Image (tube, rainbow, N blue to C red):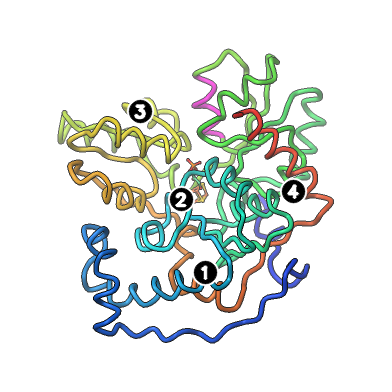
Amino acid sequence: MALAGEMQRKTGEAKPAARQFKPLEMPELEYTPGLAREMAPLYEKVKHVIPSIEWPFFAPYIRAINKLKKERGAVVLAHNYQTPEIFHCVSDIAGDSLQLAKEAAKVDADVIVQCGVHFMAETSKLLNPEKTVLIPDSKAGCSLADSITGADVRLLREKFPGVPVVTYVNTSADVKAESDICCTSSNALKVVESFGTDRVLCIPDEYLAKNIAKQTDVKILTWKGHCEVHERFTAEELRQYRKDDPNIVIIAHPECPPDVVEEADFSGSTSGMINWVKEHQPKRVVMVTECSMSDNVAVENPNVEFVRPCNLCPHMKRISLKNILESLVYMREEVTVDPAVAVRARAAVERMINLGN
Ligand code: 13P
Ligand code: SF4
């Protein structure tokens, strides 16, 4: 399949920002004794997940980013898969895909810096067309978003006339524009059932669709897209965790293959998994998902031991303190969406948000 998202990804120069921003000077990034003192309370919070040897490198960036956010009138949105120094130290709003989409719609700042992948930044732009949306690295893609194009959706509609099309938010604006409504992993079942039809196309994540299909009488047609992080987990691996420790609790993301989700004690979106841990406080847990999330959750759950299989999302990991700072200094890389596409894509995202209300 063509790298649709890659080809359709648009950043930067195409459209001027609503407000003109001047590039600033790159701030000094020295770890002085004064800065160490000023940042000590923050380090206290994250010391269990950020090694002390790394802090002198992170701290000057964190201070500079937080200062610059005020000067630029910017907010930083971070997905749950961002690393702890981003998630806990510079983000204003953190959450799963649905929460970020909803919060993006309410943002009052002039500038949104999206710490996540490109489809998330595009969703923020769709919901905030008049704001400047920046992504620190526009190459932060997604194997799911890259698995399908708008043209593919049009072909599916020809093949299955009258069948409603639900697209996962992990898609390009072109794909969203061709769909009836979007969904995320936390509302997919509700969205699929909202049509009252006997068949629904739920694309492009084959595994999410199959996991949802087990919970409904609606016949779900899907696509062969997979998340390159979650498809790597196996049911055998999970059974081995249980053999090693019969008391271990296993929670899995619904982008995992269905036999993996079957083995889990709970399955939910990233925020669903976080809330589950907060509420149940298991003694030992394995979160079958991108591995930065365990670090982020560990900060607020000191009594829970996390077993951490480390499957990293290479796209999420393109975002760093360095490129967030550069983003704010140079106001790059701006995310734009063709207005004709944006109108239809926005409608699909807003239908999803309104369904929740
Ligand atoms: P959620 O945060 O919506 O569960 O999505 C997970 C994901 O893979 C986002 O890229
Ligand atoms: Fe895409 Fe999977 Fe990475 Fe999420 S974790 S951005 S679904 S590749």
| Residue 213 painted magenta | yes
Cβ–Cβ below 8 Å for labels 1 and 4?
A: no
Q: Is residue 345 left or right of residue 86?
A: right
List x then y, in percent, for residue 247: 16, 29
Residue in front for this viewpoint, 324 or 357: 357
Circle 1 residue: 70
Tell me whether circle 4 and circle 3 mark residues in contact (CB < 8 Å): no
Q: Answer few, some or many: residues within 10 Å of disc 2's Cα (few below 14, many 20 plus, some between 14 and 19).
A: many
User: Helix, strand, or loop for circle 4?
Assistant: helix
Q: Earlier in the sequence, mark 4 or mark 2?
A: 2
> Horizontal and vertical percent for residue 149?
72, 47
- The answer to whether 306 appears left or right of 319 in the picture is left
- Numbered range of the magenta stretch: 206-214
Q: Neighbour class for label 4 at 10 Å: few (<14), some, many (≥20)?
A: many
Residue at screen point 70% across, 50% down: 126
Label 4 vs 3, first from the N-terminus: 4
Write down the residue under mark 3: 266
Tell me which amino acid carries mark 4.
Answer: Asp
Res 94 label? 2
Tell me which label, 3 or 2, sits earlier in the chain.
2
Q: Earlier in the sequence, mark 2 or mark 1?
A: 1
Q: Residues within 10 Å of mark 3 (few under 14, many from 20)?
A: some
> Residue at horizontal 45%, vertical 36%?
269
Question: Which residue, given by chain and number where applicable, does mark 4 sit on?
Answer: 174
Looking at the image, which residue is at 52% across and 32% down? 208
Q: Is residue 335 part of the magenta span, yes or no?
A: no
Q: Are marks 2 and 1 in contact (CB under 8 Å)?
A: no
Marks 2/1: CA–CA distance: 18 Å
